Image (cartoon, rainbow, N blue to C red):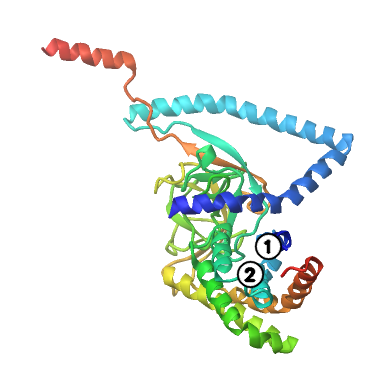
Amino acid sequence: MQLNNYVGFFRIILTLIGAMCLRIAPWPGEIAAFNPDWVLLVLVYWSLTLPDRVGIFHAWTFGLLTDVLTGRLLGQYALAYSLVIYICLKLHKQLRQFPFLQQGLFVFFCLLLSQLLLFFIKNLQHPAQLHASFWLPVFTGTLAWPLVYGVLRFVGLSQRIK
Amino acid sequence: MIPLRATISFFVDPLKYLVDLPIVLVDQAADSVSSYQTLKMENERLREEQLIHQTRLLKFEALEKENIRLRALLENSFKLGEQVLVAELLSVNMAPYEHIVVVNKGTRFGVHPQQPVLDANGVVGQVFRALPFTSEIMLITDPNHAIPVQVNRNGLLTIAVGSGQLNRLVLPYLPSNADIRPGDLLITSGLGGTFPQGYPVAVVDEFTSQPNKAFATITATPKALLDRNRELMIVWSKSTPVPLISKPAANEAETQTDAVK
């Protein structure tokens, strides 16, 4: 049981690391603007399915790592991820009862909240006119949610992560 | 704050190398299967190029000496040559709307922020943030980047601002009657102290002056192949000037002071 726990823990970390790799993958030219926030999607999945294993600490840590990875202001992703995961943890019991489409809508609002926070922080640093493509990852992220859900469900079930 | 970022980057930077790995492997595979014929042709071409460059360098040495002498006559200091470090681009994409690239040399090699970065054709950008294993380079076309330039033909000074497009720089601070034409080469002016003087930056490709506006709209195309080169050069410019008074002259000055005594 203890061993299984550790294996499960490493699986979760590995999926998050995979998401971080996708985050900086060299998509060519125009497609790069569509690249969704994979790390947040994976964090949302794990916090909804295993709320006692993946919590705000994970969100904060991986947010900080994402900050350094993408060269942002230190702490902005940490803040956004922590807040979104806090909401996920608060609502996970209701969300499990929801049909899949409604869950998708919830994920959309999670991504939107995170992007809004990033937008707000960016504007605090220096008011800049952001391109409309800044909001694209929110929509592509919602579309990518079924994929993330399927893959992580497979990973979780095959390893029986508890 | 910076040591914290450097510490975290110890855990995160391997990911950048990991993401870059498939591209390196594909490149290596392509190299190992390329035919003898193509290799030979490439070798010949490179040899020719090297010969041409070496002959040019022969002249350059003499010109440099002459330049130092002339500047000494004008009692003007002359900056010594620069030292370069070749860094390789990592194929990672940090943020889609910013022109920041990552290279595989960091503070372990002595890279520090605000160092100029060049390629074989011209100025690429400057080091924006140096981490232990990687460093982030802001390209000259980033919307937040501006580089002081000079028109090579007549020495007109201005500032080239990034446009956010990879093949475009904007020169927003020139009046409508400025002496600048399409085809003019823009070189670094050395003002501001970040970029050493005299490196090619861009070629002016459009000059339109609207009569109702005070400033002309001028666009230029960067000389450096910003989206195609994998090898970049990080530059250390030695800012210590050449001693203007040569040794014998100094001795003479000493003897003169002695004579006064």
| Residue A138 or residue A54, whichever sits in front | A54
Judge from the rendering whether residue A15 lies leftward or rightward of residue B112; answer left or right.
Answer: right
| Residue A67 or residue B145, whichever sits in front | A67
Q: Residue furthest left?
A: B261
* Image mark 1: chain: A
What residue did someone put label 2 on? A53
Of the residues shown, which amino acid type is indicated by label 2?
Answer: Arg
Q: Which corner quadrant holds the C terminus of chain B?
A: top left
Q: What's the distance in space between the residues labelled 2 and 1, CA to CA?
A: 8 Å
**Is residue B219 at least partly visible in the picture?**
no
> SS at mark 2?
loop
The 10 Å Cα crowd at callout 1, few under 14, some 14 to 19, many 20 or more, is some
- Position of residue A121 relative to residue B187, above or below, is below
Marker disc for residue B165: none
What residue did someone put label 1 on? A9
Q: Residue furthest front?
A: A1
**Cβ atoms under marks 2 and 1 closer than 8 Å:** yes
Count of labels in the image? 2
Residue at point 57% right, 45% down?
Answer: B133
> SS at mark 1?
helix
Where in the figure is residue B259, as x and y percent of width and height? 14, 10
Of the residues shown, which amino acid type is indicated by label 1?
Answer: Phe
